[in-house]
Image (tube, helix red, strand yellow):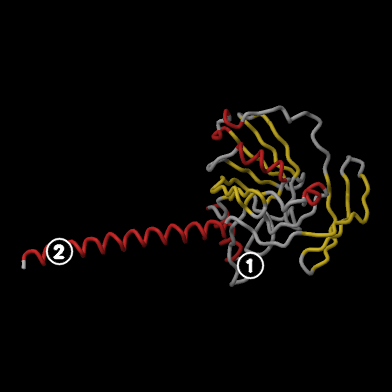
Amino acid sequence: MKYCYTSMKYNKFVLIVFLITALLYFSNGFAQVKAKTETDVDLPPARNLKILEEHKEANGNIVRTVQYDQGKNRIVETVIVHPKPPINLHIPINPDTVNKDSVLLVVNKSLYNVEVYYRRKMIRFYKAVFGPKPLENKKMEGDRCTPEGWFIIKNKNPNSRYNKFMQLNYPNDSSIALFNRLKEKGDLPKSARIGGDIGIHGIWKGGDDMIENGVGWTDGCVAIKNKDIDELYSFVGVGTRVYIRK
């Protein structure tokens, strides 16, 4: 009888260990699937990009009207393309020697670029595009606007459908405070949600022309060329600071 009791205790212990192991396994699997879902946007690639008209302004900027197909929609958009900085920023840098805590990214929505600073010195400059309304601050889910303010890199995904993805910690406290104020004032629908899944990423294979021509195709993320996201990804880590401004 004593043997049976001991055996029952042992079997119960084995069962508990098995259940805990199974729970951890499936929880981890679910977390990985969820992370992959949250770090990718889901827009169809744009096709048949055409430049309909362009002219240069007195300040050197190019005003360009483009047309492209995205899914079943044909989109005509006017964009402003800014010249590159007059300095050479493509000095070779070994990412293994970069202290990622000393890296700062500055996203300029009005200039369509991402600037990379290392110890307060600019080391890189990348062309960037946003959503169709780049100069508007993000207010809620679905407005396709890029949020403004200070953020950090929250997560990195090397296998995004847009090459690589660096997720921002949006919504952060400032974003939530803005969202709540707008809702209290009645500037947002009662059903509005704050949204999320905002980050910096590349583009589908062969899509660099969308970046070069300044086409605002994203849902509020920051998109740069694939060769640029490959390099930028190596400079930054989880916790790298990002400042997004008009």
Q: Residue sitting at 72 percent across and 62 percent down? A: 44
First along the sequence among labels 2 and 1: 2
Residue 2, horizontal then vertical, whole percent: 6, 65
Alpha carbon distance from label 2 to label 1: 63 Å
Q: Which residue is mark 2?
A: 7
Q: Secondary structure at mark 1?
A: loop
Label 2 crowding class (10 Å Cα cut-off): few <14, some 14-19, many 20+? Answer: few
On-image quarter of the N terminus: bottom left
Residue 76, horizontal then vertical, whole percent: 85, 61
In the rendered view, tell whether residue 93 sits above or below residue 24. above
Q: Nearer the viewer, residue 244 or 113?
A: 113
Q: Nearer the viewer, residue 22 or 97?
A: 22
Q: Which residue is mark 1?
A: 188
Q: Nearer the viewer, residue 116 or 184?
A: 116
* Amino acid type at image mark 1: Leu
Q: Residue sitting at 68 percent across and 63 percent down? A: 143
Q: Secondary structure at mark 2?
A: helix
Residue 20 placement, left or right of 225? left
* Amino acid type at image mark 2: Ser
Label 1 crowding class (10 Å Cα cut-off): few <14, some 14-19, many 20+? Answer: some
